[in-house]
Image (cartoon, rainbow, N blue to C red):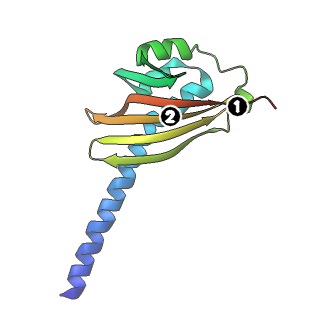
Amino acid sequence: MKYTFFVIAFVVFASSAFSQESEKAAVRVPLENYLKAHATGDPAYARKAFNSVGNMIWVKDGKYSIESFDHFITRAFTGKPAADEAQRKDHRKIESIDIAGNAAIAKIVLDYPTVKFTDYMTLLKIDGEWKIVNKSYYAEPKGSK
């Protein structure tokens, strides 16, 4: 009887762990597309990452700012990589992902030569697909060396 209980408990635990890792891999898809958009400048990757309705939010010099994803994508991803892409390419990473049901948050760090961005992404699973629905960030300028 004890053995059966442990087998059932192990199967339930292993199934849950596999499901969580599978869901984490699915959440990574839009985040990786976001990173590819930064690496290539290709707006198609950004459009795959972001939900069609959503905003980017930040505070600069004490002023709260908001920009639609559509405007951000049009402005930031011109179809060409940044001029200093060679210095940027190994400095983008997904630092953490936390999932609860159909909602997730992720922290991404883009550590570039002149600025370090910390992005906090809110994601939702919509029609079976994870999408970024909100982005807030902090930009930390780096001093000249």
* Residue 3 placement (x, y as % from top left): 24, 86
Circle 1 crowding by C-alpha within 10 Å: few under 14, some 14–19, many from 20: few
Mark sitting on residue 120: none
- Identity of the residue drawn at 38% across and 35% down: 122
User: Is residue 45 something that shows in the picture?
Assistant: no
Q: Nearer the viewer, residue 62 or 79?
A: 62
Q: Quadrant of residue 26?
A: top left
Q: Give the quadrant of the N terminus.
A: bottom left
Furthest residue in direction left, as rendered: 1
Tell me, yes or no, whether the two marked residues, 1 and 2, touch with CB atoms within 8 Å: no
Which comes before the other along the chain, label 1 or label 2? 2
For label 1, the residue is 142
* Residue 87 placement (x, y as % from top left): 74, 31
For label 2, the residue is 119
Furthest residue in direction right, as rendered: 145
- Identity of the residue drawn at 26% across and 46% down: 101
Which residue type does callout 2 highlight?
Asp
Q: CA distance from mark 1 to mark 2?
A: 17 Å
Describe the element under mark 2 as helix, strand or loop: strand
Furthest residue in direction front, as rendered: 62
* Residue 82 placement (x, y as % from top left): 67, 21
* Residue 114 placement (x, y as % from top left): 70, 28
